[in-house]
Image (tube, grey):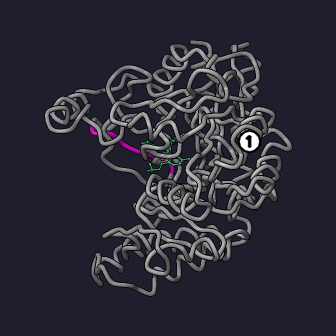
Amino acid sequence: MTRKTERSEALFADARRYIPGGVNSPVRAFGAVGGNPVYVAWAAGARIRDADNNQYIDYVGSWGPLILGHAPPRVVTALREAAGRGTSFGAPTEAETTLARMLVEALPSVDMVRLVNSGTEATMSALRLARAYTGRNKIIKFEGCYHGHADALLVKAGSGALTLGVPTSPGVPADTAQSTIVAGYNDLEGVESIFREQGEEIAAIIVEPVAGNMGLVLPTPGFLEGLRELTDRYGSLLIFDEVITGFRLTYGGAQNLFGVMPDLTCLGKIIGGGLPVGAYGGKREIMEMIAPAGPVYQAGTLSGNPLAMAAGITTLSVLARPGVYTELERISTLLAEGIADAAKRTGAPVSFNRIGSMMCTFFTPDPVVDFKSAVKSDTEQYGKFFHRLLDEGIYIAPAQFEAMFVSTAHSEEDIEVTVEAIERALTG
Ligand code: KE4
């Protein structure tokens, strides 16, 4: 497909005059794959259409929230009705309790939740709460996991396994980064040695129970259980960052799937149905430390706002219906099998990870089981693959270290078209 791109290019040039890098979130700028971003003008179901009228089958889904596809009619109707009753009050509303109750009923480890406006707010607040509850400062995060852009989480491994973290961004104070220890995802022995050295100082581990920010990497059997055992042994908290996995893999969290119960859970994306919503929750005795019930401060002007509540409640209500995840699994399996067959037929040097409706094609022939194996991927080849698919009308993540998302709006025909395009894109 010879894609016209003039309008998107003009919009990008204009945006760069007013917005840093022309975007409001870095990954959207196509920096990891080259070229200019497509400016989306319209979307419905599994499709987006850009400012030059090119249409694509979309596997980004706004980076995860749109598990029902774009502009699901029920969600749009609920938003219209909510907007007609007022968009924000800065006062409590019944809808906030409704969404909170749905989250508590879906997540076995969660007795109470606080609603916020983004995943970053959720993880930032959960860390503050864990530090207040334990009276300790240090946290452990994992290389390749992303938890939003709070200072304490923009940290990479310092030299040597047990030394403290160093900032990944200017502006993060060194002494903040030094309270963050960076361990290897799936390296339980490494985490154990950190606890042997510093266990009494560690407030919490924060982990993506399925990693979606180094491409898709699954927890090895026993990894999450091992983190649970270590945090119990040393009196630290276990925080699951389920901003991506929450309601993605099942109605609830990865915690429901793996049967490992964290002390705190962070949520976002799907629970807002495309509107800005984050949440953090956990055991009552911990959550009741949050103001105004307790001394740990956290606030937000638009937290729990009526429009986001309407979108979130409607989305979860649809997901709660029998058979939704079964059908999503069926369609996702068709895509995964199609990609695997295409890779085999073309002999392309790729490996592939999938769980439920999340998947990732890595441009490395070796299995990807952690950060070190993920970064062996040939990002230049991924960029070429991305652009070939774009020209074929398929929109996947403009970065190798992200995941592909299938929605309930994707049809068998969409999958067929996608697999054929992927086969051509793999042959180059
Ligand atoms: P937000 O602040 O972007 O709502 O959520 C931060 C966050 C927290 N935890 C996990 C596991 C996440 O994946 C994210 C954000 N995800 C990225 C993409 N993987 C959002 C895309 C972007 O940064 O534009």
Task: Identify the residue at image location x=74%, y=29%.
Answer: 369
Direction from residue 62 to residue 244 in the image, left or right:
right
Image quadrant in which the N terminus is located? top left
How many numbered marks appear? 1
**Residue nearer the viewer, 76 or 414:** 76
Direction from residue 245 to residue 347 in the image, left or right:
right
- Place of residue 352 in the rendered image (x, y in percent of width and height, measured from the top left): 71, 29
**Residue nearer the viewer, 420 or 272:** 272
Task: Identify the residue at image location x=33%, y=35%.
Answer: 171
- Place of residue 76 in the rendered image (x, y in percent of width and height, measured from the top left): 40, 69
Outermost bottom residue: 94
Segment tinted magenta in the rendering = 46-51
Residue 50 belongs to the span the image colors magenta: yes
Direction from residue 12 to residue 229 in the image, left or right:
right
> Is 380 drawn above or below residue 267 in the view shown?
above
Residue 99 belongs to the span the image colors magenta: no
- Place of residue 260 in the rendered image (x, y in percent of width and height, measured from the top left): 79, 57
Task: Identify the residue at image location x=69%, y=49%.
Answer: 200
Image quarter for residue 141? top right
- Place of residue 263 in the rendered image (x, y in percent of width and height, measured from the top left): 68, 63
Q: Residues within 10 Å of mark 1 (few under 14, many from 20)?
A: many
> Is 94 drawn above or below residue 423 in the view shown?
below
Three-letter residue code for mark 1:
Phe
Outermost right residue: 222
Residue bearing mark 1: 195
Image quarter for residue 223? top right
Name the element at disc 1. helix
Direction from residue 200 to residue 98 in the image, left or right:
left
Image quadrant in which the C terminus is located? top right
